[in-house]
Amino acid sequence: MIHFPVSNSNLSATHLGVFLSEKYDLNRETCCRIVRAGVNDTYLVDDGNTKYVFRIYSLNWRTEKEISAEIGFLHLLREKNIPVSYPVGDKRGGMIQRLPAPEGERFGVLFTYAPGEKIHSVSAELHYQIGVILGKLHAVTRDLPLERVVYTTEILLAEPMEQIKRFLATDTPEWAFMEEARDFITGQLNGADPAQLRRGGVHLDIWFDNLNISKAGEVTLFDFDFCGNGLLALDPAYYVLQLHNIEKDEQERAGKVEHFLRGYESVTPLSEEERRLLPMLGICMYFFYLGVQCRRYENWSNTFLSEDYLKRFINVLVKKYYDLYRLGKTAQL
C-alpha cells in the first residue's frame, strides 16, 4: 500500500516510550505522553523515578548542526551554574535521536525535567530573581558566538512581513501600520550607537511559559529552540513585553518591570541606548513570532490563524504596545 505524503505528523507516545526506555536504559514501565504539538512536539517521559522531556523537531525546522549548537550552549550554561533544563545522553552517549517519521527523518532530544510549574503571575521578588538569572546568563553569553541564526533586522522585521502577507491583505490599515512600524524601527536600530549595544548569545523566548518555578521558589529556564546571536537587550525586551500582557494593573506592572530590570542590572547594566530601544525590540519580537506562526501554519492548521486573528493581534497587542511608548515618526516630533 502506498501512503499519501504528509507534511507533519504526531509520533505515537506509546511507541516512543518503548523506544526511549531502550535507548536511554530507562525502566521498562516508562510512561510517555504528548503534552504539546506545534513547531516542535513535546512529550513528558516518566520512568517511575525520574521525569524527562523529549522534544521532536519538525521536519526541516532545525538542522543537526543547529541542534548540536543548542546542546553545546545548554551544557555551557549548566557548567556556569545557570539553572536550565539540559540535554541527556543515551546509554551510548548520543544526544540526538533520528526518527523515521512519515514525512521524513526528524530529530529528537531528551532533556531534564524542570522542577515546579508554570506560574502565570508571580511576585515582584520572583521577577527580580528572574532578572538576576537572565543577567547571569548574559554575563556568560556576551560576545559568545553560536553556530546559530544571527538575529538581524532583516530576520526580525522584514522576513516576517513576507510570511504575514500570505494571510493578511496588503490594502488593510493593519498592513499599513505594520509597514510603518517596520520602517521606523529598522531606522532606529540601524542608527543606534553600536558602542552601547551588547551582543552575544540570546534565548529569545524567556517568559512564564518557558520557565518553571518550584515550591521553594527556584526558577529553571527551558526551551532554547530559538537561541541564536543578537542584541542581548532582545531578551529583557521580550520579558518586559510579556509582563505588559500578563499584568493589567498599570501600577503593579510598573513595579514588577522595575524589579525585573533591577535584578538584571544587579549583574550586568543596560546602557542608555539599550533602555531606549527596549520597547522597539519588544515590537521586533511581536513581528518575529507572528512570522513564525504564519510560516508554520500547517503545524496548527487554521483553527486560529486567519486574517481576522492577525488583525486582532496587531490592533490589540502590537499597535497598543507601539502607541503606549509613543513610537513612530509622528510621536517622535
Image: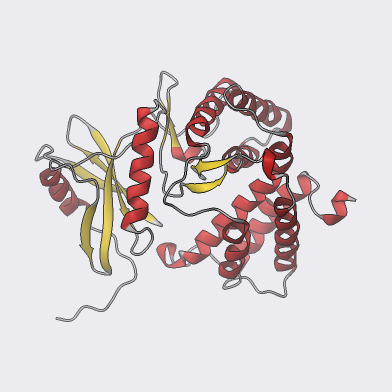
Front-lying residue, 258 or 3: 258
Which quarter of the picture shows residue 104? Answer: bottom left
Residue 304 seen from this side: no
Q: Is residue 258 above or below residue 29?
A: above
Observer-nearest of 317 and 226: 226
Return the x and y of residue 303 as percentages of the image width and height.
48, 64
Left or right of 172 on screen, residue 52: left
Depth order, front residue of 167/57: 57
Comparing 257 with 3, the one in front is 257
In which quadrant of the rendered view does residue 174 lie? bottom right
- Give the percent coordinates (x, y) of residue 155: 57, 59
Q: Is residue 10 left or right of residue 128?
A: left
Q: Residue at x 72, y 75 (%)?
A: 171
Q: Does residue 74 lie above or below 83 as drawn?
A: below
Farthest residue, direction front: 195
In the displayed structure, would residue 6 be above or below residue 203? below
Point out residue 255 in the picture as x, y percentages from the top left corner.
68, 25
Q: Is residue 174 left or right of residue 302?
A: right
- Residue 30, can we see it? yes
- For the rendered model, the colour scheme is secondary structure
Residue sitting at x 33%, y 36%? 75
Residue that appears at 73% across and 33% down:
250
In this rendering, is residue 293 above or below 227?
below
Left or right of 265 in this view: 83: left
Furthest-top residue in this view: 216
Q: Quadrant of the N terminus?
A: bottom left
